């Protein structure tokens, strides 16, 4: 046998993995991730507790009238008006979901499969505008329909994104027109 073949036959490969150390790291990392998620959940529950003074959300009345506009899209959450990072989580307002919006003379009906539906009476609507972000969701300029409404003694901004973003301008005009009409009628009384 030649010396080169002998050297190759006698060499053993080094141990590739230290399994005990690897398992320790995986377990440690898994526990750390679980702790972070648990802390996030507790923070969400604590925020809901702090916002416990928010009254129950209005439900859709039996008679809302004819639909002026409808929209299918996503509900991205609600915040304290003017503070786009102060998310409201009480009563399910912090839960993102699909949404079906219907604007009638009675107000704005928000149907959310898998989350709490709510209704904003026309008298509680304060403003509609296009914006670029709301608590954890940032889009291009004008990519989000934000509706400001009053609930209890709090002004709330709720963010929606239509499946067809071109509809947003029509919604802003319709809601602001409704608010203007309601305020004029209220001033005349």
Image (cartoon, grey):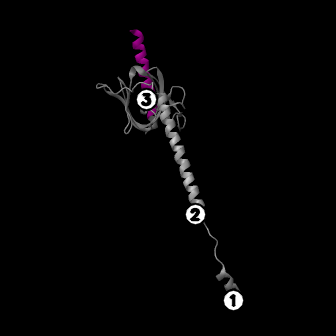
Which range of residues does the magenta coloring cover? 167-189
Query: In the image, residue 174 lies at what x, y percent?
Result: 42, 25
- The alpha-carbon separation of the residues under discs 2 and 1 comes to 37 Å
Q: Secondary structure at mark 1?
A: loop
Q: Earlier in the sequence, mark 2 or mark 1?
A: 1
Q: Nearer the viewer, residue 50 or 127?
A: 50
Residue displayed at 54% across by 44% down: 36
Q: Which residue is mark 1?
A: 2
- The alpha-carbon separation of the residues under discs 1 and 3 comes to 87 Å
Q: How many marks overall?
A: 3
Q: Nearer the viewer, mark 3 or mark 2?
A: 2
Q: Which residue is mark 2?
A: 19
Q: Counting other residues with Cα less than 10 Å from the Cα at mark 1, is it few (<14), some (14-19), or many (20 or more)?
A: few
Q: Quadrant of residue 125?
A: top left
Q: Which residue is mark 3?
A: 171
Q: Earlier in the sequence, mark 1 or mark 3?
A: 1
Res. 88 in view? no
Residue displayed at 45% across by 38% down: 96
In the figure, 114 relative to 50: above or below?
below
- The alpha-carbon separation of the residues under discs 3 and 2 comes to 60 Å
Q: Nearer the viewer, mark 2 or mark 1?
A: 2
Query: In the image, residue 16 lies at what x, y percent?
Result: 61, 68
Q: Secondary structure at mark 3?
A: helix
Q: Magenta stretch containing residue 114, yes or no? A: no
Query: In the image, residue 136 lies at what x, y percent?
Result: 53, 37
Res. 169 in view? yes
Q: Nearer the viewer, residue 136 or 170?
A: 136
Q: Magenta stretch containing residue 182, yes or no? A: yes
Residue displayed at 48% across by 23% down: 155
């Amino acid at each position: 046998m030649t010396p080169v073949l002998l050297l190759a036959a006698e060499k053993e490969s080094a141990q590739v993995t230290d399994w005990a150390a690897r398992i320790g790291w995986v377990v440690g990392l898994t526990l750390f991730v679980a702790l972070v998620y648990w802390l996030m959940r507790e923070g969400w529950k604590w925020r809901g507790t702090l916002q416990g003074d928010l009254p129950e959300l209005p439900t859709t009345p039996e008679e809302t009238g004819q639909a002026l506009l409808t929209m299918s899209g996503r509900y991205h959450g609600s915040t304290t008006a003017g503070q786009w990072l102060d998310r409201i989580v009480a009563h399910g307002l912090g839960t993102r979901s699909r949404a079906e919006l219907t604007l009638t003379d009675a107000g704005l009906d928000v149907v959310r499969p898998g989350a709490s539906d709510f209704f904003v009476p026309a008298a509680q609507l304060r403003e509609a505008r296009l914006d670029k972000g709301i608590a954890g969701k940032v889009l291009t300029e004008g990519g989000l329909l934000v509706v400001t409404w009053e609930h209890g003694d709090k002004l709330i901004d709720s963010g929606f994104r239509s499946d067809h973003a071109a509809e947003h301008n029509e919604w802003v005009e319709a809601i602001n027109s409704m608010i203007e009409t309601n305020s004029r009628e209220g001033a005349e009384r």
